[in-house]
Image (cartoon, grey):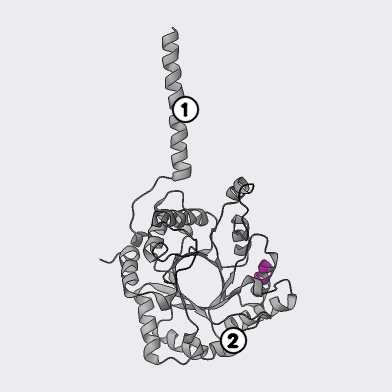
Amino acid sequence: MKKGFWTSGKILFWSVWLIILVLIWIFVIGIASHQPGSFFNKGHNAVWVGHEWVGSKKSTKEIKNLIDNLRDKQIDTVFVHVGPLHDNGLIDGDTYEYVEYFLEKAGKFDSDIKFQAWLGQIRSKLDLSDAWVRHNVAREAMILGQMAGFDGIHFDIEPVWDGDKDFIQLLKETRELLPEDKKISVALSEFIPRTFIWMTEKVHKFENYNSQVNYKNVAKYADQIVLMAYDTGIKKGWMYRWLVREQTIWVTNLLDGKELFIGIPAYESENPDFDPSVENVENGLLGIIEGLNNLRSEEKNFTGVAIYPYWEIGEEEWAVYRKLWLGEK
């Protein structure tokens, strides 16, 4: 009697543990498929380019070569640098002196490629609590979108964080001034789950973090969000790929109905927060592909990859991109 009871108890004990392990596997690790990157590539990818395209007069051949290269790589969203923003919220007009010329030429070669004015600055240099500074930034956005002819505005003001109400107010005021058919795009740093911040706050204090709070606040006014999955300080390739995978899983679950790009690096300037042998196009793409294969992700909310920057990516990295993302041999 006791032996039978003990055997039944052991079966029940291990059955419960098996169920727990299965649930952990499903909800923490996740069941994964093994589709290639080309399966998830929707032909809507992005890249950041320098202000020389609108600050100087490029030849027709140079512009055609750019458009041909973008089309060849299935890139249809281009963030064109027109800044930086000065501390008063204004930009120098000569940084985009030839914008109408460029956009007209580019549009003739491919009208499906969209160009957004990239406005960037270090957050601490912009006092966005000053209504006049915010007004100037929003007005510049309106000029670039409505008068200069850009398809939208891409804000890359770093770092912004959960409690940055002034930045959210800037987005609100920009939306009010910008025509409805012009997109607002925002580049944000990596997502940190609010629960993780709460669990670790007594051991490690995070500063300027982006949890679901900031992502959702930004999404109230932005049509498009670009997650900058680089400058992480990670020194191991497998760890960086894991981070990009988890970022892809988490953020695709956050942003229903918005365009979402995952930004990956193509630059070589090594610093304490960036090791190009770890953070690069190959590891970034592998992380994204692993994330989209994981059944915890919401692949329908993913738009494409964004490469930073266009002016540094070389042929070897394009070859990796072609193989992993376009499915070319």
Residue 169 included in the magenta stretch of the image: yes
- Viewport quadrant of the C terminus: bottom left
On screen, residue 18 above or below 84: above
**Magenta stretch bounds:** 167-171
Horizontal and vertical percent for residue 178?
A: 63, 77
Q: Disc 2 on helix, strand or loop?
A: helix
34 in the magenta segment: no
The label on residue 147 is 2
Q: Position of residue 175 (x, y in %)?
A: 64, 73
Say above or below: 164 vs 183. above
Q: Disc 1 marks which residue?
A: 16
Judging depth in this view, the residue of 280 and 289 nearest the camera is: 280
Report how far apart the C-alphas of labels 2 and 1 lie in the structure: 65 Å
Residue drawn at x 65%, y 78% is: 137
Amino acid at dot 2: Met
Callout in the foreground (2, 1): 1
Any part of residue 10 in sight: yes
